[in-house]
Image (cartoon, rainbow, N blue to C red):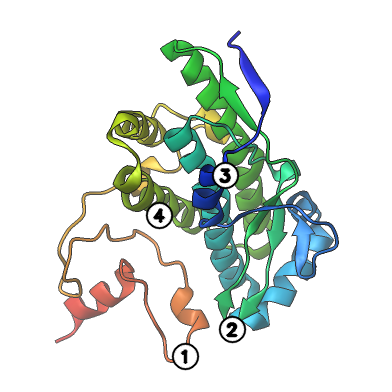
């Protein structure tokens, strides 16, 4: 069994980086917040989604759930993945340790990610197998112990497609690594970040998600130029319904719907 020290705290400069992604200290009785674990209660989950729906401008709970998982995925994954790959420190992103905030201003999220316990695990070994086991523990907490649970809950309560929810999460994983971690970590840490990213995309990596298949792999595609983009984009396979919560409709830069309309128009 690998050895790790779970009593470390993030350094000041590490906190500054992760706070920019939404990490914050937990404070009790904050308005417009709920313990993330309470979203697994059907009544509380539906009540929370119903509160958020008009603030988002969403027409129904299915659209609301899709947009909520996008926000939760970023706030949960960005600090955890950056701490792991960039600092070799393990945050606890489990649903029991997390709080879901949902303030919005003019349909724009103002939420952050409070963690009840912000101490981090630090591996006391340079052995690759030990780091792999340490990494599995961190990733299992945030995926099978958090995001997978919410995907199943939102699917069951709102009937939003699991594929939509998982692609929302996958897109966040891609952007966190490609645009934030690999673009900013030191050269010394870059190889570690690339290896962690590859591991998350490996189709044989399934146990982290508590599923029979890796739910991210299917959505990882080569970027391409489209008739609607100036730079190569990874076109989504599903639509996240964001356009249904905007007036007039606004489409994400990688949304497949405008492309379908463009290619089928006379």
Q: How far is the residue under mark 2 from the one under mark 1?
A: 9 Å
234 vs 187: above or below: below
* 117, 152: nearer the viewer: 117
Q: Which residue is mark 4?
A: 171
Q: Tag 1, which secondary structure? A: loop
Q: Would you say the residues marked 2 and 3 are in contact, meaning their CB atoms lie under 8 Å apart?
A: no
Work out which quarter of the rendered image holds the N terminus and state it: top right
Who's the residue at 81% across and 54% down the image? 41
**Earlier along the polypeptide chain: callout 2 or callout 3?**
3
Percent x, y for residue 196?
Answer: 39, 31
Q: Residue furthest front?
A: 12
Q: Position of residue 231 (x, y in %)?
A: 17, 65
Q: CA distance from mark 4 to mark 1?
A: 24 Å
Instruction: Look at the numbered discs 1 and 3 and tell me whether their residues touch, using CB distance below 8 Å.
Output: no
Counting residues from the start of the chain, the first of labels 1 and 3 encountered is 3
Q: Which residue is mark 3?
A: 12
Which residue corresponds to mark 1? 247
Q: Spatial distance from mark 1 to mark 3, Cα to Cα? A: 41 Å
- Find disc 2 in the rendering and name its residue: 57
């Amino acid at each position: 069994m690998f050895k790790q020290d779970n009593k470390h705290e993030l350094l000041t400069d590490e906190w500054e980086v992760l706070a920019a992604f939404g990490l914050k200290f937990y404070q009790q009785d904050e308005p417009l917040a709920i313990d993330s674990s309470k979203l697994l209660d059907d009544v509380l989950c539906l009540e929370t989604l119903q509160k958020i729906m008009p603030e988002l401008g969403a027409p129904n709970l299915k659209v609301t759930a899709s947009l909520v998982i996008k926000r939760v995925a970023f706030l949960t994954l960005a600090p955890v993945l950056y701490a792991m790959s960039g600092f070799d420190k393990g945050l606890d992103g489990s649903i029991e340790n997390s709080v879901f905030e949902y303030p919005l201003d003019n349909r724009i999220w103002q939420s952050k990610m409070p963690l009840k316990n912000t101490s981090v695990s630090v591996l006391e070994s340079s052995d690759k197998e030990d780091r792999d086991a340490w990494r599995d523990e961190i990733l299992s907490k945030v995926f099978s112990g958090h995001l997978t649970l919410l995907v199943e809950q939102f699917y069951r309560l709102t009937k939003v497609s699991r594929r939509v929810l998982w692609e929302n999460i996958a897109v966040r994983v891609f952007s966190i690594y490609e645009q934030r971690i690999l673009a900013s970590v030191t050269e010394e840490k870059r190889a570690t970040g690339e290896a962690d990213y590859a591991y998350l995309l490996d189709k044989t990596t399934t146990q982290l998600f508590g599923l029979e298949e890796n739910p991210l792999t299917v959505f990882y595609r080569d970027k391409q130029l489209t008739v609607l983009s100036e730079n190569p984009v990874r076109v989504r396979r599903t639509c996240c319904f964001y356009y249904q919560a905007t007036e007039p409709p606004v489409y994400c830069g990688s949304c497949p719907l405008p492309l379908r309309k463009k290619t089928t128009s006379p």
